[in-house]
Image: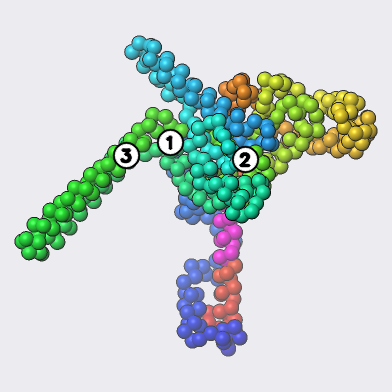
Amino acid sequence: PLRPSLLLLTNHEQQSIITMTTRVPLSTNEILSPPPPPSSDNRDAYYAKIPILKRRASKSTKKDPTCVIVVGMAGSGKTTLMAQLQKSLNLRDAADDKEDGDNTTTTTTATSSTKSTNNRAGYAINLDPAAKYVPFTSSIDIRDTVDYIEVMRQHKLGPNGAILTCLNLFATKFDQVMAILERRSFPLEKNELTSIGEEGEEEGQASEEVAGDSNDNNSTDETQQQQKSDDNDNDNNSAQASSNTNNISNDNSSNNTAPLDYILIDTPGQIEAFTWSASGTIVTSALATTFPTVLAFVIDTPRCAASVHTFMSNMLYACSMLYRAKLPMVIVLNKIDIVGCEFVKEWMEDYESFQEALDDASEMNNGYSDEMAGGGGSSGYYASLTRSLSLVLDEFYNHLHKVGVSAATGEGVEEFWTVVDQAAEEYEEGYLVDLKNRVEEQMAKERAMQRVGARKLVRDLQEDGQL
């Protein structure tokens, strides 16, 4: 007898379920046995969905640009630092071009080879919709897509809510941004451009043959008129195809001479709107699964010098972002033209040094109340909490890259690029390996779900006597 659940089905539906059992590629023993390891074809199918894993699997020789997401508290100097970073790239280009013009032919050849190895090309993106003035040239600007003031007016939102809404609207089209970045980062090679031109010529020849066959079936007068119009159309199509091919080659000629090395992304001043929102997660994940990505957390060094508690608050926020994004992080100690960053590096490298600074701050009170400063000594609640947190974060500091820069003068920018390259290597050893492990875990879960479904189907059909 059939089970009650099957009695509710029609004969056709029951026969369809029975037919499904013949399509199950697993026998009863295979279903009950441990699952086999995934095949290379299944793994390649999963890797094809993730751009960076797909390129690694295909062993592509094209260099991946490093994506630098600049984040930090409001007023820490993120946008000014973006301008200085872009300026450093452009100044290097101008200096190399000037040097090439002044040298002789032999010297120019040697200089051009040096330029190809030292030159760095950058691509800037602005994700701050509320910025009225941006001191750097952004290739992609969220303000061109979303009007911050109009969002506030239409949705009746405050400043922070409007920034969050603008990011959410922009995230719905971020796949188009990624397509632009991939085309800019990996331009077509000459052989690929040639194949595109050959395909255009083949399409033009095919259209001419079809037009000629159709014209033979018409009358003489109509054939002549139609052939003239078809010839004009074919000429226009050929011209359009050749122009498109020329445009593609022209677009990629400059890219081939200046391959993309860095992608700089400026985030809103309200750090919470980006780091703790769904749109921020979408943007970060999309970039991290396509390019080697590094977080640059900008810290206001003079504020840290004024209060050890401000330094601890910045470190806690950096720790939370590292835990959330799982990406390599560079601590950028900004404004070193005002206050040097050596004391911050010492606090991060030497636990006892920070404890001494905390004792000094507690004794001097630093403008805080006795309760906040630790009751004038080291036994207060706030001082005790800060000591405990510093002990916890002591191990966290060992996994951070740190560099001091001045967004106003450009001091330390070259060292910044060196540290970013080191963090990009850490991406290959850390995030990329974790990403592969997550893919393997997802594949194992799907295989397990398939086997559980197959077991349930076989068990039900066995109980019903249909198998």
Q: Mark 2 packing: few (<14 Cα in 10 Å), some, or many (20+)?
A: many
Q: Does the magenta stretch include residue 421?
A: no
What amino acid does circle 3 point to? Asn
Dot label at residue 268: 2
Indicate yes or no whether the magenta region holds residue 440: yes
Q: Is residue 321 left or right of residue 53?
A: right
- Residue at mark 3: 247
Question: Where is residue 156 shown, x and y percent of the image?
Answer: 64, 53
Above or below — where is 342 with respect to 386? above
Q: Name the residue under label 1.
A: 61
Along the line of sight, the residue nearer the viewer: 251 or 224? 224
Dot 2 and dot 1 residues touching (CB under 8 Å): no
Mark 1 is surrounded, within 10 Å at the Cα level, by few (under 14), some (14 to 19) or many (20 or more) other residues, namely few
Report the Cα–Cα distance between label 2 and label 1.
Answer: 35 Å
Span highlighted in magenta in the image: 439-451
* Few, some or many residues within 10 Å of mark 3 (<14, 14–19, 20+): few
Q: Which residue type carries mark 1?
A: Thr
| Residue 140 on image: x %, y % | 49, 40
**Residue type marked 2:** Pro
